[in-house]
Image (cartoon, rainbow, N blue to C red):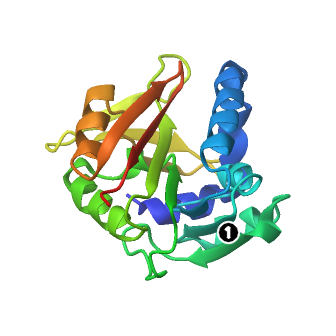
Amino acid sequence: MDSLAEYYAKRAAEYERIYAKPERQADLATLRGRIGKIFKGKHVLELACGTGYWTDVIAGTAAQVTALDLNEEVLAIARTKPNASRVSFVRGSAYEIPDLGRRHDALFAGHWWSHVPVERLDAFLAHAVDSVAPGAMLAFHDNRFVEGSSTAVSRRDAQGNAYQTRKLDDGSTHEVLKNFPEESELIQRASRHGWGAHVDLLPHFWLLTWWAPK
C-alpha cells in the first residue's frame, strides 16, 4: 500500500474532479459561502491544503492565509489559483506543523480528518490546537458517505478505520484510508480539545467548528 502522501502526489492532476460531481454542486456552493464567511478577516492556518480549492475560497475573505502541504505536486497547482498571491505556501506535514509563532486565529483542514487514523486523531487535534493562538477557531470539512456517490468501503481494520480501493488514470490501484465519522463522534472529539463544537450536516458533506481553549 502506498503512503497517503505518495497517493495524493500521483493523483494531483486529477484530484479536483471530485468537485465536479453534479449531485454535490448545491452542497459545495453552500460550503463555499459558509467557509468564506467564517474566515473573513482572520489569519488562517490551513493544513493539508492539497491543490488549493478551499485555500482559494478562504483567501478571498481572510486577512492572511498560511497553507501547508507535504507534496510539492499539489502545492504547484495551489499556487496557480486566483487568490494565490494572498497565500503563504509552506511545505510540511499536518502531523508536524512548523512553529509559526501561534499567530493564526483560525485553522482549517478540508478532506483531511477522514484520512487521520482514529488512533491518531486526539494527538493530531492536540497538536493542531497548540499550533494556533489561544481561543482560535478551528474548522474541518469532509465527506459524508452517500451510497452511489461515495466510493465503497472495501475493508475495515481492527481499530475501526475504513479503507477504499481507488484507481487512477494511469491504471494503478491504491488502498486509501477514508473514515466517515458520525456527528456525535465529531462533537465528542472536538470537545476534548476546546469548546463550542458544532456540526453542519449537508447531504454530501459536514462542517465542524469549535474554539481552542483560551
Residue reaching furthest to the left: 158
Residue 115: x and y in percent read 39, 50
The image quarter containing residue 76 is: bottom right
Residue reaching furthest to the right: 82
Residue 193: x and y in percent read 26, 53
Q: Is any part of residue 177 visible from this angle?
A: no
Image quadrant occupied by the C terminus: bottom left
- Judge by depth and name the residue closer to the eye, 93 or 43: 43
Residue 186's place in the image compared with 7, above or below, is: above
Q: Which residue: 41% across, 63% down?
A: 3
The image quarter containing residue 198 is: top left
Q: Which residue: 27% across, 62% down?
A: 126
Residue 125's place in the image compared with 177, above or below, is: below
Residue 98's place in the image compared with 185, above or below, is: below
Q: Secondary structure at mark 1?
A: helix
The mark tally for this picture is 1
Quick check: 16 left or right of 141?
Answer: right
Q: Which residue: 55% across, 68% down?
A: 69
Q: Which residue: 38% across, 50% down?
A: 211
Q: Which residue is mark 1?
A: 75
Residue 34: x and y in percent read 63, 35
Quick check: 54 left or right of 94?
Answer: right
The image quarter containing residue 65 is: bottom right
Q: Is any part of residue 42 visible from this angle?
A: yes
Residue 162's place in the image compared with 123, above or below, is: above
Image quadrant occupied by the N terminus: bottom left
Three-letter code for the amino acid on which mark 1 is drawn = Leu
Residue reaching furthest to the front: 214
Q: Residues within 10 Å of mark 1 (few under 14, many from 20)?
A: many
